[in-house]
Amino acid sequence: MSRLFLLFFLFITACGPLEEVFVEEDLLQRPQAKRCADCHAEIFKEWEKSRHAVAWKSEGFKRESENYTKTKCLSCHAPHQVDPQKKPALRVEFKEDGVSCVACHFKEETKAMHGPLEVWSPPHPSKRDLSYVKSGFCAGCHQETYKEWKMAKVEKSCQDCHMQSLGKRDLIQKFPFYYFHRAKPRHSHEFVSLIASAKDVRVSFKEGTLQVENVGVPHNLPTADQGDPRLYLIAKIRYVDGKTKSVRRVFSPQAGNPLPYKTPLSISIPNAEGVSFIEIKILRRLAWKKEKELILSKKIHAKSLYSQNGKRDLGGSQRAGRDIKR
Ligand code: HEC
Ligand code: HEC
Ligand code: HEC
Ligand code: HEC
Ligand code: HEC
């Protein structure tokens, strides 16, 4: 018993000096992201695939910032320090790392890595900071999107959707450190763009108009502060007399007409009374991609023009009769 106590005592007293032995000074001198990969190899691999990693090097940004000469454009694409709700200042070193590990995690005030967890990290000081799990953390840069998200009044945060949980995993992959640490909650650092699914966009044909509503994405569809992502709607109309016509619309933040959350939009259809059916396709194009991707493809029969509910209306003459009597 007393021997165990002695061992425990030795361990406790060793902890102080031990931390000094393992501390790696350069980690607090704002190194490149790849230095963090020495221990956080998996997180680094995810981040490398993200748009944050190319925020500075991106062809689109290089062109639109006129080869980095428009100074007001630079700070969010190579930030010094990220604080909730605050537009960041421009970083001096390693701008090619874009929105980097150090920018998001290192704080000048504490000279420590801030993050969502309580950890023991001898190579560098760490501090638990719960602002990391809130949408406000993203708000200094994704300013417009954050405002839209706030209006949507949903529970899910940006992180819930764009930094999905990976369950419990090791934060570090370096020998011998991983022996001292247990698996902890991890979140994907790929910052995936995601894509709306067919159930996120409701399309119906009522009273001669096509109604389009973003019912699933709790910010504008598409959303952007600076980029030019687009949503395309193509409606091929077939009339009872065999004639066809197509109606096209482009929705984008740049044009000022994206689809807000839960606010239906009407598109009038010419000669609506003569419509047989409409084939609808909705596609999107991200700001940094050339290709369009399909979100929804749907065929709506004109029957629904005269009823609130297409399915129930089948064999509905009886019902209609009853309704009249009442
Ligand atoms: C307040 C922070 C902020 C500032 C300032 C800023 N951007 Fe961005 N930029 C973003 C964010 C966030 C995105 C991600 C998508 C979006 O919301 O537009 C982005 C995306 C982009 C994209 C699309 C992605 C790509 O790589 O092609 C371009 C182009 C771009 N910005 C150019 C600019 C230009 C030009 C300026 C200056 C006029 C500028 N940005 C200033 C935050 C900012
Ligand atoms: C020599 C190894 C090593 C290097 C290099 C390293 N770290 Fe760590 N880091 C650790 C250890 C150990 C932990 C704690 C792991 C655990 O508890 O499972 C940690 C934890 C963290 C945490 C979690 C903090 C929290 O409270 O949630 C963050 C954030 C972090 N590191 C950021 C960085 C960044 C950014 C870099 C690059 C500048 C970096 N680390 C480089 C070893 C390292
Ligand atoms: C320091 C500014 C900054 C912060 C903070 C920031 N971002 Fe970004 N984000 C950007 C920039 C700039 C881009 C565009 C990069 C590019 O494509 O050139 C971007 C792109 C993205 C994209 C890809 C968008 C697309 O068009 O495909 C997603 C998703 C994203 N960020 C989510 C988040 C989330 C979630 C958070 C908060 C946890 C966050 N960002 C915090 C600056 C920031
Ligand atoms: C755009 C800002 C941003 C960038 C860039 C970024 N992180 Fe994070 N990181 C976060 C946020 C936000 C969380 C908290 C996620 C949550 O808990 O929902 C986090 C969580 C973590 C954690 C805790 C474990 C986890 O997965 O939740 C570690 C460790 C970490 N980051 C290290 C890194 C390293 C290393 C890099 C670079 C390779 C990096 N981060 C790049 C914002 C960022
Ligand atoms: C309920 C999940 C959810 C939440 C919460 C959420 N998003 Fe999204 N976000 C999506 C989906 C789905 C898309 C893909 C839309 C599409 O098809 O283009 C998306 C797309 C984006 C894009 C790419 C541009 C676009 O419209 O395609 C950015 C940037 C973005 N989100 C940022 C954010 C930020 C910042 C927050 C928090 C303020 C946030 N998102 C909250 C689901 C979510």
Image (tube, rainbow, N blue to C red):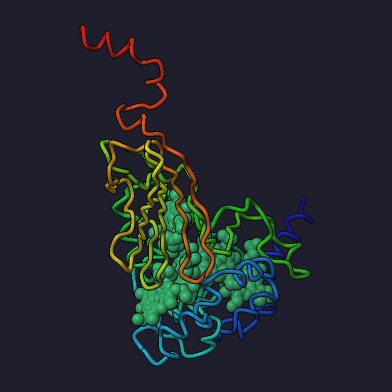
Name the residue located 38 percent from the left edge and 52 percent from the top edge.
Answer: 246
How many callouts does the rendering have?
A: 0
Quarter of the image where ligand 5 sits: bottom left
Q: x and y percent of residue 235 in the render?
A: 40, 49
Rendering quarter of residue 207: top left
Name the residue located 46 percent from the left edge and 39 percent from the top edge.
Answer: 299
| Residue 13 horizontal side relative to residue 308, left or right | right
Image position of 33 with respect to 278: above or below: below
Name the residue located 35 percent from the left edge and 57 percent from the top edge.
Answer: 249
| Residue 151 horizontal side relative to residue 66, left or right | left
* In front of the other: 115 or 226: 226
Q: x and y percent of residue 312 in the render?
A: 39, 20
Image position of 307 with respect to 206: above or below: above
Name the residue located 45 percent from the left edge and 79 percent from the top edge.
Answer: 77
* In front of the other: 264 or 275: 275
Can residue 126 be seen in this snapshot? no
| Residue 229 horizontal side relative to residue 265, left or right | right
Image position of 149 with respect to 191: above or below: above
Can residue 71 be seen in this snapshot? yes
